Image (tube, rainbow, N blue to C red):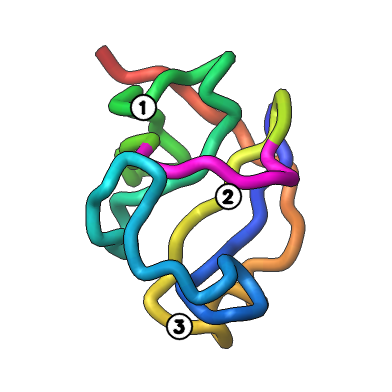
Amino acid sequence: MFVTTGYCICEECSGGFDLTYSGTVPQARHTISADITRFPIGTRLMIHDIIYTVEDIGSNVIGEHIDIYYDNHEDAVAHGKQIEEVFMVE
């Protein structure tokens, strides 16, 4: 079980950076931020029925915390803080 939160590219969520830590353009329903000591860049994780790829990191994303990318701030905030099952995809 992991804590999941939402983020976007706005100043409040990510300092206004428009690229991920891995250098990609973040995409909703694809990009997540994770603790790369636990899930290296490129790791694929399934949350509900969506397969995401770890492409980003965050200063508060440590251990069992996943930050899910959204296209806009309203959706990111609406995600809130949830406890969800996360599965590795090979």
Residue 41: mark: 1
Cα–Cα gap, marks 1 and 2 = 14 Å
Residue ranking furthest to the bottom: 74
Question: Disc 1 or 2, which lies upstream in sequence?
Answer: 1
Q: Residue at x 31, y 60 (%)?
A: 26
- The relative height of residue 89 versus residue 57 in the rendered view (above or below) is above
Going by the numbered disc 3, the residue's amino acid type is Asn
Find the magenta span and give its range: 55-61
Q: Is residue 10 magenta?
A: no
Contact between marks 1 and 3 (CB within 8 A): the answer is: no
Nearer mark to the viewer, of 1 and 3 = 1
Which picture quadrant has residue 27? bottom left
Q: Quadrant of the C terminus?
A: top left
- The residue indicated by pointer 2 is 67
Identify the element where label 3 is drawn.
loop
Contact between marks 3 and 2 (CB within 8 A): the answer is: no
- Camera-side residue of 81 and 26: 26
Q: Residue at x 72, y 66 (%)?
A: 80
Cα–Cα gap, marks 1 and 3 = 23 Å
Residue 72: mark: 3
Which picture quadrant has residue 78? bottom right
Contact between marks 1 and 2 (CB within 8 A): the answer is: no
Going by the numbered disc 2, the residue's amino acid type is Asp
